[in-house]
Amino acid sequence: MDKKNALRAGALAAGTTLMMLLMSSPALAITRDDGDDPGVGLSAWETVGLYVLIPLGLFVLIAGLVMVLDKSRPSSSKN
């Protein structure tokens, strides 16, 4: 019975994904809208910096601040 439920869940997930893909119709994005004025595209390095390096830097900064400012445990571990 467990295999039957897994197949049902897989079929439901596949059907939902297919319907979402068909209804989103990204091919219509090719035609430009009235008043559409896109800017200059990003280079590969700008894209990597914007979507990879800046988030990683923010994560390291926030994690560092949390570790430095954490007052809940003592700095030396005495038993």
Image (cartoon, rainbow, N blue to C red):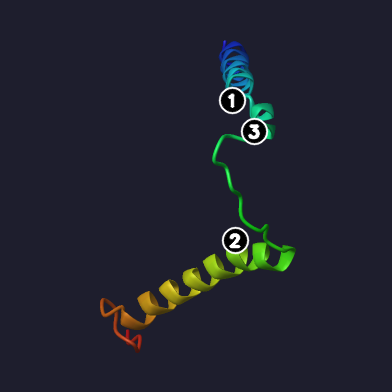
In this figure, what is the number of numbered marks? 3
Residue at x-position 63% and y-position 24%? 25
- Report the amino acid beneath label 2: Tyr
The residue at which mark 2 appears reads as: 51
- Left or right: 63, with 72 as reference point: right
Whole-percent x, y for residue 58 in the image: 48, 71
Please determine whether, in this image, residue 20 is positioned above or below residue 5.
below
Q: Specify the farthest residue to the right.
A: 44
Quarter occupied by the N terminus: top right
Please determine whether, in this image, residue 42 is positioned above or below residue 26.
below
Q: CA distance from mark 2 to mark 3?
A: 23 Å
The residue at which mark 1 appears reads as: 24
Whole-percent x, y for residue 79 in the image: 32, 84
Badge 2 or badge 3: first in the primary sequence: 3
The residue at which mark 3 appears reads as: 29
Q: CA distance from mark 3 to mark 1?
A: 10 Å
Assess disc 1: are there few (<14), some (14-19) or many (≥20) residues with their C-alpha within 10 Å of its C-alpha. Answer: few
* Near-viewer residue (73 or 55): 55
Whole-percent x, y for residue 78 in the image: 32, 87
